[in-house]
Amino acid sequence: MSLQIQHFFHPASFTISYVVYDDETKQCAVIDPALDYDPIASSVNTAFAQEIISFIKDKQLSLIYILETHAHADHISSAFYLKKKLGGDICIGRNIVGIQKTFKTVFNLAKDFNTQGVQFDQLLNDGDVLTLGNFAIEVISTPGHTPDSVTYLIEGNAFIGDTLFMYDSGSARCDFPGGDASLLYSSIQRLYALPDNTNLYMCHDYQPAGRELMFVTTVAEQKQKNIQIKADTSEQEYVTKREARDSTLANPKLIFPALQCNIQAGDLPAADNDEKHYFKTPISGLENLE
């Protein structure tokens, strides 16, 4: 009996998705799956999702959970598509409901758009435990990047979403609605309190200076090497640097289509009266036209 972890890299969004499975029971979970989206053509396809599906079928696995670490702003989730093809419960942190309420207003979504998280199969709380074959998946609330951010801890392996990146890239931004650098500092401290040999699996790797892909490190390495937050970094020092950095960042290029899908488990916006699906893009800067 052993836990197996297979990564899949999505170059267009620098996302790493994972299939985690029990090789005895053949039960598996998919973590942070991505959907291909061409913003110029405004078209979606499932090539990357099909890689994951093919792996699951080749290994004769049974998909039990599709686990989202948070509502991503930089890629569209393929959770809805994977569930359609393979089944499984789509799970996310319970605070997705606040994000749904915020972006229902931002995108002026239909009045009947439900903001109670019903698009997901399970809304998870800090301390919840899911069962995957012979293994337990512990849910750890790690807000700061987003209010709904959670970490999934499985047998000494923590899938941490955007809370931290590889040590040469630092940590997540905190300037999205509901983000908070102090909260993120506290969440990182929870991760740093895990045993030093705990493996930390990234949701993204931006490959600075063109280095090879890296997607897993340890708590000990992060505490020693992270360029933004080491073991002895104070909260004030971190918050000051994080907020200064965030003030220089542009929006992710897929933020508007990504959030319109990801607040509803990766499903596309409902079809319009012409039976076509549309993304909304709010326009700012109108005062400059006066």
Image (spheres, rainbow, N blue to C red):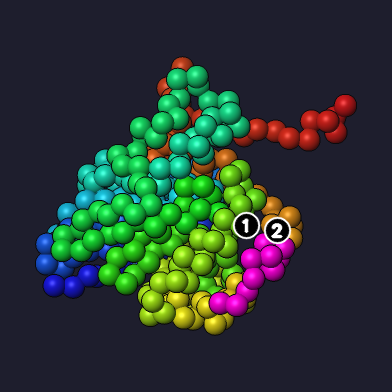
Identify the disc placed on residue 92: none
**Residue 270 appears in the picture as rendered:** no
Can you give x and y, in whole percent of width and height, for residue 270 in the image? 43, 27
| Residue 74 among magenta residues | no
- Secondary structure under tag 1 reads helix
Q: Residue furthest top?
A: 273
Left or right: residue 99 compared with residue 174: left
Q: Is the residue 101 above or below the residue 266 in the image? A: above
| Residue 241 among magenta residues | yes
Report the predominant secondary structure element of the magenta stretch. Answer: helix
Question: Which quarter of the figure has residue 226?
Answer: bottom right
User: Crowding near pointer 1: few (<14 within 10 Å), some, many (20+)?
Assistant: many
Give the residue type that dot 2 points to. Answer: Glu
Disc 2 versus disc 1: distance between alpha carbons?
7 Å
Identify the disc placed on residue 243: 2
Left or right: residue 239 compared with residue 94: right
Residue at the image point whose x is 54% and y is 82% from the top: 224
Q: Residue furthest left?
A: 24
Can you give x and y, in whole percent of width and height, for residue 70 in the image? 45, 50
Can you give x and y, in whole percent of width and height, for residue 266 in the image? 40, 41
Kindly indicate whether the residue at mark 1 contacts the one at mark 2 (C-beta within 8 angstroms): yes
Q: Is the residue 21 above or below the residue 252 in the image? A: below
User: Crowding near pointer 2: few (<14 within 10 Å), some, many (20+)?
Assistant: some
Q: Which residues are magenta?
A: 231-242
- Secondary structure under tag 2 reads helix
Question: Which quarter of the figure has residue 242?
Answer: bottom right
Looking at the figure, which quarter contains the N terminus? bottom left
Identify the disc placed on residue 181: 1
Q: Is the residue 225 above or below the residue 134 in the image? A: below
The answer to which of 150 and 20 lies nearer the viewer is 150
Give the residue type that dot 1 points to. Answer: Ala
Residue at the image point whose x is 45% and y is 67% from the top: 191
